[in-house]
Amino acid sequence: MAKTPEPEKPPLASFEASIEDLEKVVKELEAGDLPLERALALFEKGVGLSETCRKQLEEAESRVEILLKRNDKVQPEPFHPENE
């Protein structure tokens, strides 16, 4: 039997694009005067975008910790932006 190929998952949007979409959702919800179904759909989309962003941040944090790993021991270092 030939195995049917699974549909490809769409690539994850960049973190920046997800944040931008989340900001649009929040602005629309804050504007009010939405039908209940539209508000629920936007809320659901916002929760999904928020989860996507959280996962991307956790993955980035893990990658940074791996890069900072020294002597088989993770040594997290605080981030200090140059413009502070």
Image (cartoon, grey):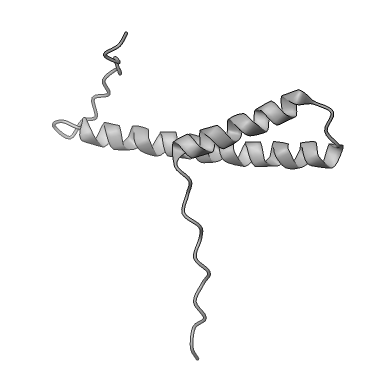
Q: Is residue 26 left or right of residue 68?
A: right
- State whether residue 60 is above or below residue 12: above
The residue located at (43%, 34%) in the rendering is: 57
Looking at the picture, how far across and down is residue 83, in whole percent?
A: 30, 11
Q: Give the quarter of the image for residue 15.
A: top left
Looking at the picture, how far across and down is residue 37, in whole percent?
A: 83, 42
Q: Give the quarter of the image for residue 58.
A: top left
- State whether residue 84 is above or below residue 38: above
Q: Is residue 50 left or right of residue 59?
A: right
Looking at the picture, how far across and down is residue 23, in whole percent?
A: 60, 29
The residue located at (64%, 36%) in the rendering is: 46
- Specify the farthest residue to the top: 84
Using the rendered image of the protein, determine whether residue 50 is visible from the camera's viewpoint: no
- Specify the farthest residue to the left: 71
The residue located at (70%, 41%) in the rendering is: 44
Q: Is residue 62 left or right of residue 72?
A: right
- State whether residue 2 is above or below residue 50: below
The residue located at (15%, 30%) in the rendering is: 70
Looking at the picture, how far across and down is residue 80, in whole percent?
A: 29, 14
